[in-house]
Amino acid sequence: MHASLRHFDHSAPAPDCLDELIAPVADAVRHWRGSVPAEHIVYVDTDPEWADTAAFVEHYGPELLGQSANCVVVSGKRGGETTLAACVVPSAARVDVNGAVRRRLGARKASFAPMDTATGASGMEYGGITPFGLPVDWPVLVDPAVVDLPYVLLGSGRRRGKLLVPGKALAELPGAVVLDGLGVA
């Protein structure tokens, strides 16, 4: 398996850990049809205390920052319409909400979705949102730097646990769009 796994006490192929995942994420793994075999999507057990990026990197090691990604929910508005989307960027980057995201969504205004909107609409826990298992009508905007990673650590849908996923699999998610300029330093 991947070198990142040495940092964790428990890891297993995600299809073998469906009970550890929330229902929409488990369904996404169960029905995965991408070019990467589902068994290459790995669930790693982590303490919820270390879910946030800074705490995670401090606890598990700074070398994981370059292998980690954040998934954030954004809201684009135009007229009376609101579009929710997920953005996946390297953990060391920030999402270009007012540039790349706003343009891609065709929105007049874009912002990070409020926590209750992000968790309520995704069905996931704040600090653990993942692009796996999101509503099918959401665009999933993915930074090319994340797609280029051999493996990337990201949320599992809960604060407990992470998914270790081949980066190219993220480009194959339903609604995925690889978007240049999404993540900025």
Image (cartoon, rainbow, N blue to C red):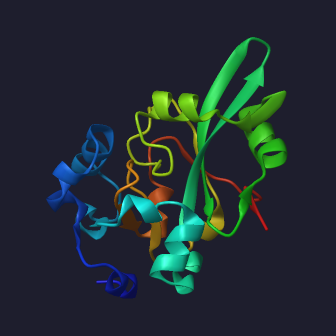
Q: Which residue is drawn at 34% across and 61% down?
A: 161
Where does residue 122 sit, x and y in percent of width and height?
46, 34
Residue 30 left/right relative to 162:
left
Please say if 106 is above or below 60: above
Q: Can residue 147 be seen in this view?
A: no
Q: Where is residue 41 in the image (x, y as percent from the top left)?
A: 31, 65
Is residue 103 visible in the rendered image? The answer is: yes
Quadrant of the rendering where the C terminus is positioned: bottom right
Residue 21, image x and y in percent? 27, 49
Which quadrant is home to the N terminus?
bottom left
- Left or right for 8, reference 78: left
Tell me which corner region of the image, top left, top right, bottom left or bottom right, holds residue 94.
bottom right
Image point 63% across, 60% down: which residue?
89
Is 116 left, or right, of 113 in this rendering?
left
Of 166 and 9, nearer the camera is 9
Considering depth in this image, is 120 or 86 the residue closer to the camera? 120
Q: Residue furthest top?
A: 80
Query: Considering only vertical position in the picture, is 8 above or below 140?
Result: below
Q: In which quarter of the image is residue 136?
A: top left
